[in-house]
Image: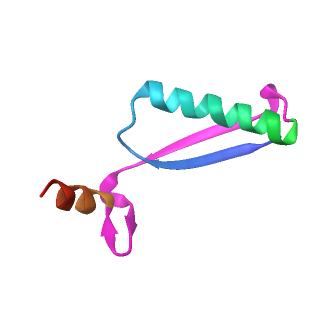
Amino acid sequence: MPLIDVSIARGRTPEQLRSLISALHKAAEESVGALPENTTVIIREVSTEHWSKADQTIAERNAAARG
């Protein structure tokens, strides 16, 4: 009974998120033989202002890249 919990920066389309969910389900089936009805996927979208790496948020990095 895999539980796949993914955190991702907010900003993807519903179609992109749906594609990710499908790919994760397929990966669980192919890699560990999980049955689809026993696999749970949770997508947690995090605001870019609340996600940082190397003391810089994604929002700050994006703003700096835009100039």
Classify residue 64 as left or right of residue 18.
Answer: left
Q: Position of residue 30 (x, y in %)?
A: 81, 35
Q: How is the image coloured?
A: rainbow
Name above or below for residue 19 compared with residue 41.
Answer: above
Quadrant containing the C terminus in the rendered view: bottom left
Residue that lies at the very extreme toward the bottom in this rendered image: 55
Q: Is residue 9 magenta?
A: no
Residue in the picture at 64% in, 33% down: 23
Q: Position of residue 26 (x, y in %)?
A: 72, 31
Tell me where the magenta segment starts and ends, as one range. Answer: 34-57
Q: Is residue 33 left or right of residue 40?
A: right
Q: Is residue 21 left or right of residue 31?
A: left
Measuring 33% from the left and 53% from the top, which residue is drawn there?
Answer: 48
Q: How many marks?
A: 0
For this orientation, the residue located farthest to the left is 67
Q: Residue at x 46, y 24 (%)?
A: 15
Q: Position of residue 46 (x, y in %)?
A: 41, 50
Residue 36 included in the magenta stretch of the image = yes
Image quadrant in which the N terminus is located: top right
9 relative to 23 in the view: left or right:
left
Q: Position of residue 55 (x, y in %)?
A: 34, 75
- Residue at image position (66%, 37%) is 24
Residue furthest right as drawn: 33
Quick one: 5 or 24, which is closer to the camera? 24
Picture quadrant where residue 27 is located = top right
